[in-house]
Amino acid sequence: MTTGLWERETFVENLRGIGARAYHDKHPFHVAMNEGGLSPDALRGWVANRFYYQRSIPIKDAAILSNCPVREVRRVWIHRILDHDGNAENEGGIEAWLQLSEACGLSRAELIEDRHLQAGVRFAVDAYVNFARTQPWPIAIASSLTELFAPDLMADRLRAFEKFYSWIDPRGLDYFRRRTSQARRDSDEALAITLEYCNTLGLQREAVRALEFKCDVLWSILDAVHHAYGLKEGRLPSRLRENPGGWETTVPWSDAAQPRLAKGVRLQIDAATGKSVLLFPEGIVELNETAHEILTRCNGRTVRQIVKALTEDYDADPASLATDVRETLADLQRRKLIELT
């Protein structure tokens, strides 16, 4: 390995590992959408709220350009603004999304005036734009690498819409058709820039964290939409089921379950920041205090015992604490950072 750097292949594997673990195609709402499990109201709610993200993309890209002193990079990146805002030759992605809204039975004014916008969506998207404005430009570009995972997502989404939501005018699906190819081109460009300019180990680590942050933004958008609109009655996604503690994937939650770190995952304190982190082959995850306290007790104890210990240590409400523990463990399991036995 080159001193002070990840090898190119390792760096790319670390970036791609984020998508395999945390991309929003695994969110319950998204899974339900691709399985035909959304009501018309829920689907319209997603379209209306996602518009706030769509129209913020060129603002984000303009922020990156304003911080970038490298002419060659600006020349590569600038087409993204026109891809969304459009010009005389190209109506642009924002216009295509407005056409999708009309195909779903929403008016343009409903989207443009944010009539259905959820506060959580606004917060997440604004945080992403602010990230692009304030971070070093190579790190902001790295956060765009969710495009690595977008072509397959767009193709799957298009098939799902055509199969399950035939009430939508098919002419409104043009956004998904064009992004299938655009996302592949964009991801190739962003990856090449990231590999060239994230040229220290510190920048490479920050690039991985930036991509994790972007995945969190996309996940948070779906959290807000899911909370507001839910799923069509009787049609939960087949790979997921709901319980009082949150969403689970493959292992049934029970008080007797014993959570443990997944193979290759280590809990430690980052020497540079003093914060608790999980290290794993694909990268690093910084933990909040709640997650740290829970994971330090994943030493053979059952979920019931973890909740009991935390309740005694912090004199907290057991029911509320049990919910926090289950939600935290569910999120870590979704990211494949813990296992349950």
Image (spheres, rainbow, N blue to C red):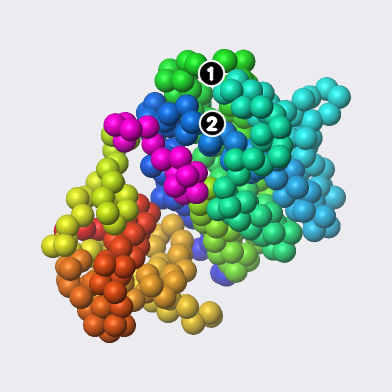
Residue lying at 22% horizontally and 79% vertically, measured from the top left: 309
Q: Amino acid at mark 2?
A: Arg
User: Could you tell me which secondary element the residue under label 2 belongs to?
Assistant: helix
Label pair 2/1, CB-CB below 8 angstroms = no
Residue lying at 32% horizontally and 49% vertically, measured from the top left: 247
Query: In the rendered structure, does residue 6 fall within the stretch colored magenta?
Result: no
Residue range in magenta is: 223-236
Residue lying at 50% horizontally and 16% vertically, measured from the top left: 167
Taking the image as shown, residue 109 lies to the left or right of residue 47, namely: right
Bin the neighbour count of mark 1 within 10 Å (Cα to Cα): few under 14, some 14-19, many 20 and up: some
Q: Quadrant of residue 58?
A: top right
**In this rendering, does residue 93 appear at all?**
no
Residue 42 location (% of width, % of height): 47, 34
**In this rendering, does residue 278 appear at all?**
yes
Q: With respect to residue 185, does 313 lie above or below? A: below
Query: In the rendered structure, does residue 228 fall within the stretch colored magenta?
Result: yes
Where does the C terminus fall, quadrant-wise? bottom left
What is the C-alpha distance between the residues marked 2 and 1? 10 Å
Taking the image as shown, residue 242 lies to the left or right of residue 12, namely: left
**Which residue is tagged 2?**
44
**Sequence-first tag of 2 and 1:** 2
Bin the neighbour count of mark 2 within 10 Å (Cα to Cα): few under 14, some 14-19, many 20 and up: many
**Which residue is tagged 1?**
168
Closer to the camera, 135 or 185? 135
Q: Amino acid at mark 1?
A: Ile
Q: Which dot marks residue 289?
A: none
Closer to the camera, 63 or 246? 246
